[in-house]
Image (spheres, rainbow, N blue to C red):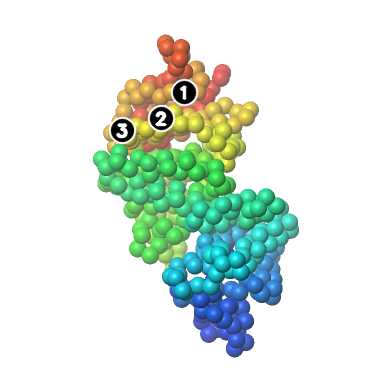
Amino acid sequence: MILDWVPAHFPTDDHGLSRFDGTALYEHLDPRQGYHPDWNTAIYNFGRKEVVSFLVNNALYWLEKFHLDGLRVDAVASMLYLDYSRKSGEWVPNQFGGNHNLEAVEFLKRVNMEAYRLHPGVLMIAEESTSWSGVSAPVDAGGLGFGFKWNMGFMNDTLRYMSRNPIHRRYHHHDMTFAALYAYSENFILPLSHDEVVHGKGSLLEKMSGDDWQRFAGLRAYYAYMWAWPGKKLLFMGQEFAQREEWNEAKGLDWWLLDAGMHEGVRRLVGDLNAAYRELPALHARDCEPEGFSWLVGNDQTNSVFAWARQAPGSEPVVVIANLTPVPRDNYRVPMPKAGNWVERINTDAGWYGGSNSGNQGKVVAIPSEVKEFGPYADLYLPPLSTIMLKYDPS
């Protein structure tokens, strides 16, 4: 259970903290510091010890009394920059003339240090949308002290790609590969968050391109792509069975959809992806280190095919191949980390998940190259709109 915790701002309702004793007690008096134009809300005065104490203890309260697994700290970027969403003349520089909110920075460091000191193993996650350095670095190393950072770039880029007509995806190949350039600059969580399925944005299933079959196939392929990508994984409620309607806090989830085979197939896939993720250290042990990932096919824009290897010390490698068009590819050649037998651990096109049940009969053989300068390779059948995970089998 992860709570969306919001110390960045608070409502200006009469019954809330705003002007609590008739004065600007919790917020800044100066609207250039104490008023948030984006949300018509008040901003905490992080320079007051009483306010910082209130907020730090509020965070610890949730962890101590409710035993939450973690806090996802909302809108961190708006806390870090004094000129966030403000024009020239609408903000007050810090004591050095810069735009960093030094008091908010110290507050974030303190709340993270206290949370980890008193509750080891808790998750402190920053929803931070800029390139601020060291968000998930320890405080004693100059960072803000969060354990993880929300990877909004991966979410936005890949969902935009999956919403495109497959015939146009070749022109936007970088949307699926760009995250590899910065994947290790922070400890990232890959979220498909609540923000993407509210306010008319539609459900994840609705975001997929094509007819209903292609939407389900695309969503399954996308989930497996994400599970195999470096970074921790997070779905929002309803996404584990492909909720058709966008999130509505006024009613429950449409669990009855599980009576339909395609929705039940997505639920089965998410369960199997979780099992594979736990079982295969290559998929998770080096999520935040570049040694855990290597491209095998990263530039096949023409076919919209992606392939990479995941590896971790003491475990066998895993190869991932995604074909993100509705066109099956036969005898598609992929470089392989090792020669020998590879077991098909996940195939999102399996009939068990609602796919067309095509693939490689559960096994692929990688053979040494005839040219000594090149490594092993395998010729695969790639089902339409699918992602395959292959596990090396030394036996």
Closest to the camera, between mark 2 and mark 1, is 2
Q: CA distance from mark 2 to mark 3?
A: 11 Å
Viewed as shown, does residue 69 lie left or right of 93? Answer: right
Amino acid at pointer 1: Met
Q: Which residue is painted at 51% across and 76% down in the image?
A: 32
Specify the quadrant of the image occupied by residue 165: top left
Report the residue marked by disc 1.
336
Q: Which mark is residue 41?
A: none
Residue labelled with disc 3: 303
The residue lying at 50 percent from left, 44 percent from top is 182
Identified by mark 2, the residue type is Val
Element carrying mark 1:
loop
Q: Earlier in the sequence, mark 2 or mark 3?
A: 2
Mark 2, secondary structure of its residue: strand
Disc 1: CA contacts within 10 A as few (<14), some (14-19) or many (>=20): many
Towards the viewer: 21 or 192? 21
Question: What's the residue at 40%, 48% (across, down)?
Answer: 157
Residue at the image point whose x is 62% and y is 62% from the top = 105
**From the viewer's perspective, is residue 229 above or below residue 259?**
above
* Amino acid at dot 3: Asn
The answer to whether 85 is drawn above or below residue 175 in the figure is: below
Residue 229 image offset from top left, x and y in percent = 49, 40
* Crowd band around label 2 with a 10 angstrom C-alpha radius: few (<14), some (14–19), many (20+): some
Residue picked out by circle 2: 297
Q: Secondary structure at mark 3?
A: loop
